[in-house]
Amino acid sequence: MNRVAGDRSRPTRQILPLALTPVVEGDLATYFEGLANPTRLHIVERLAQVKEARVSDVAMLLGISQPRMSWHLRLLRRAGLVLTRREGREVFCRLDRTSIAENLSAFTALLAGDGQPGPAESRLGPAETVNPPSPRHGVERSLPEVI
Amino acid sequence: MNRVAGDRSRPTRQILPLALTPVVEGDLATYFEGLANPTRLHIVERLAQVKEARVSDVAMLLGISQPRMSWHLRLLRRAGLVLTRREGREVFCRLDRTSIAENLSAFTALLAGDGQPGPAESRLGPAETVNPPSPRHGVERSLPEVI
DNA sequence: AATATACATAACGACACCTTTATGAAAGAA
DNA sequence: TTCTTTCATAAAGGTGTCGTTATGTATATT
């Protein structure tokens, strides 16, 4: 097992015993992978509306086949976007809003530039200057708080 | 041209004349595709720290080859995450924070369940009830406002 | 002019994604 | 038990991702 080409392997997420698990970089990529597909976005959109739904009902509603639904549900679970619960032979799924908020929060922290290399331009282009971190750019601070 | 298997084609984003372009579903998937890779997340992380950087400097810093950097930069541009500016033979890149905020905002709107099918459980599982939309779940309303 | 630098692109290989079709397994209904 | 429903999974094919190496192109330098 040598991980030759492509860093797309996923080394089985660490589970820290009772500590709110920090979102590391690889997990963040896996999280966004879950969202990087129109079909899965539709599923997420649907689950955002109904809170919980039977798997095959969602598949029916979106007009996708059952194995296809199963496939995408698998990726959504891996991404930490969706939780499932079995009830007899049926499976119900819902958004994992906690995990979603954690990952989204980790991403915005990344965007905020947390980490040492503060205002150090790596060879800044001409006619461009480092601004003090005060009045951000405009759209740079706004987001509906409805996670 | 028939789009047989896999809905991963991208039909050349509509450009509406002077109107703040709404983020449609396919674009949102493309946006998240840009974030669905550790290397690209590292690039984004770096650009969040330095605001603008020379392409090959970022590549050097992250220890990735030049063609690899060029490849990922291409996807980052396609995703609307990064803007580039040519200066002679050099290329500088920076985050497209406007586009990033737009897409992130579109996603949170999707999570909020915008769209008709309000509190209609599609065959709700037993021992589970629809809550009124008042005091949300807890982590469900919080996000660092540092986009 | 010739050379060096910065970036883009093509070619290739390995693998992952995504779809359909076909089967399998488990739980409920007849 | 037998049939049906619900979901998971395997197989197979098409396509995209993602990495390296090699080559091309444009700009700066000598």
Image (cartoon, coloured by chain):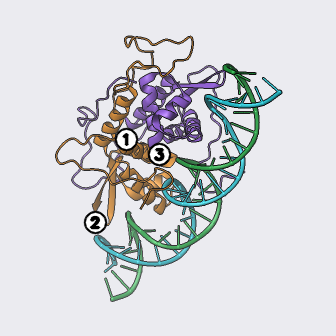
Chain colours: A purple, B orange, C green, D cyan
Q: Earlier in the sequence, mark 3 or mark 2?
A: 3
Q: Tell me residue A17's x, y (percent).
A: 65, 22
B146 on left or right of B60: left
Circle 3/circle 2 CB separation < 8 Å: no
* A74 vs C15, nearest the viewer: A74
At label 1, which amino acid type do we have?
Glu
Q: Earlier in the sequence, mark 1 or mark 2?
A: 1
| Eye-nearest disc, 1 or 3 | 1
Q: Tell me residue B95's x, y (percent).
A: 34, 45
**Res. B88 mark:** 2
| Eye-nearest disc, 1 or 2 | 1
At label 2, which amino acid type do we have?
Gly
Which residue in the structure is indicated by mark 1?
B25
For the residues labelled 1 and 3, the Cα–Cα distance comes to 25 Å
Considering the image in quadrants, where does the N terminus of chain B appear?
bottom left
Label 3: how many residues lie within 10 Å, few (<14), some (14-19) or many (20+)?
A: some
**Res. B42 mark:** 3
For the residues labelled 1 and 2, the Cα–Cα distance comes to 37 Å
A4 on left or right of B25: right
